[in-house]
Amino acid sequence: MRGRQQGGGLINPRWFPRWLKPVVHAACLLPLVWVVLAAWQDRLGANPIEAITRFLGDWALRGLLVALLVTPLRRFSGWTAVMRLRRPLGLWAFAYALLHLLSYVVLDQYFDWAVIWGDILKRTYITLGMASAVILLVLAVTSIPALIRRLGGRRWVFLHKSVYLASVLGILHYFWMVKADTSSPWLYAVCLMFLLVLRLPFPHRRNPALKS
Amino acid sequence: MLIRSLARWMERESAVTPYDDYLNRRTFLQGTAGVIAGGALALGSGRAQAAVSRPADGEGLAVLPGVQESPLSTSGETLTPYKDATSYNNYYEFGTDKGDPVRYAASLKPRPWTITVDGACAKPGVLDVETLLGMPLEERIYRLRCVEAWSMVIPWVGVSLKAVIDRFQPLSSARFIRFETLNDPVQMPGVRRAVLDWPYVEGLRMDEAVHPLTILAVGLYGSVLPNQNGAPARLVVPWKYGFKSIKSIVRISFVETAPLTSWAKAGPTEYGFYANVNPAVDHPRWSQARERRIGEFRRRETLPFNGYGEQVADLYKGMDLAKFY
């Protein structure tokens, strides 16, 4: 009998068909295609700039949560090869965060650096969002294979644990922005907490059936 | 995308219907005797102002008869397209997304509708919306500046709040006026969640309430108010942030002390009782210095008192507006 840590053996741990990565990339591209088309066709309502910025921010958070799902998925399914999706998913989350930031800088503020700098210093939610973006930028850059090797496994793992901090900051950024209805940021917060709980070490309980 | 929506509007502007055709169209559309009588009444009142010549645009909503132009209208502004003004709304009783009100407000029943008027006044009573609609209606083109740093220009139709207030003869002890929105979970899906402490409450100082710019709006673009814009009657106070302009009013009370308003209750450090548009006093979480006019790309400078300082700044003489935000 297999222990839970090894998963249920429902899936071949090495299963990774050739089409999987392209399909994941295509799926990650879909929201971006949707928003570009919607903007082009004037379907984003009265305030398209706000709609684009919020849409991209939403998908940055969703992307982070999906990327954070990979490790628990391996843990509970035993599907080891799924780890090969962690890097592309993380990079897609970063891409949406970057586009969200660009939308704020270019569309919303139109390169008004004085205002942007003032926002970063004065407005807590912008400060938090910006901190989250900087962390994600560092993680994206250190995802280049040559840099992973230069950093060395242990340091790389330690550095990349800060994705948790980036996620927490990203969600706080959302909390601090809304006026009264916090249901949507709460949903992200609960999902993140769940994903973090799935990473906790199991208490070592022996299966009583195995006891002699 | 922005250019196209502007072009849509400009087409409407250029196709200004001659006044007689406008009257005929209205008569044709509004076959009810009462409305025709109302129109005749307004026309017969011999007011010096001209009737509004732009065709009404209510997308099927009843056209308001005999609407007169007003010298208090803001000139020189491009009107926000009707579709934008009626599909991008903050009306939390129907949901917190700005697309929610237009999606869900169909469940609101704006007729029959009465407004209870009580408190410190000689003649408390009930104001029927039909009575409001029978009063001489004026078009007031006003800038609307939301606390979220976006703005619109809307041609409201309504009556001066003072004309309404006078009917109930407030006492000298009435220093403030309190407004309340309908709070009905059947008609308003949003109030089933305690996002705010329902009912929505707003208030004005009495001198603000009787200021000529303050109106009770019953329509926009020449037609009755769409539900998502606060049908059947809402306040419009153009020099204050939009949340002061309370929608779908069911109760007006004359009171002695400043009422605790909904947003001031929800976030006392963020929303004050006065809520005058003020580029110099930021919301704690965002700047109020500039705003995005709906339909424009670059933000524009926000004007003190939303550009109505000449008319209203005197009301706040000697007050520290950073303290009374």
Image (spheres, coloured by chain):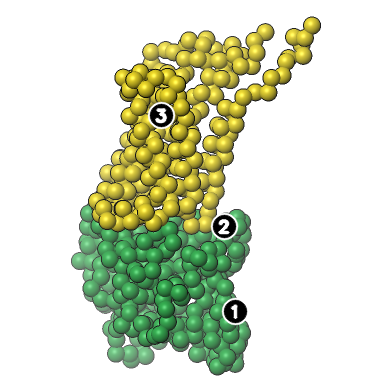
Q: CA distance from mark 1 to mark 2?
A: 25 Å
Residue under the image location 42 percent in, 19 percent down: A153
The image quadrant of residue B317 is: bottom left
Depth check: B296 or A88 in front? Answer: A88
Total marks placed = 3
Q: Chain letter for green?
A: B
Q: Secondary structure at mark 1?
A: strand
| Amino acid type at mark 1 | Thr
Q: What chain is tagged by disc 3?
A: A
**The C terminus of chain B lies in quadrant:** bottom left
Q: Secondary structure at mark 2?
A: loop
Can residue B81 be seen here?
Answer: no
To the question of a shared chain for discs 3 and 1, the answer is: no
Can residue B310 be seen here?
Answer: yes
Answer above or below: position of B273 versus B209: above
Residue hosting label 3: A90
The mark nearer the N terminus, 1 or 2, is 1
| Dot 2 alpha-carbon crowd within 10 angstroms: few under 14, some 14 to 19, many 20 or more | some
Percent position of residue A86, x then y: 43, 24
Residue B195 shows which numbered tag? 2
Percent position of residue B25, x then y: 32, 71
Residue hosting label 1: B116
Drawn side of residue B12 relative to residue A90, left or right? left
Residue under the image location 31 percent in, 53 percent down: A117
The answer to whether the residues at label 1 and label 2 have Cβ atoms under 8 Å apart is no
Q: What chain is tagged by disc 2?
A: B
Q: Chain letter for yellow?
A: A
Q: Residue furthest top?
A: A212
| Dot 1 alpha-carbon crowd within 10 angstroms: few under 14, some 14 to 19, many 20 or more | some
Answer above or below: position of A140 versus A74: below
Residue B234 shows which numbered tag? none
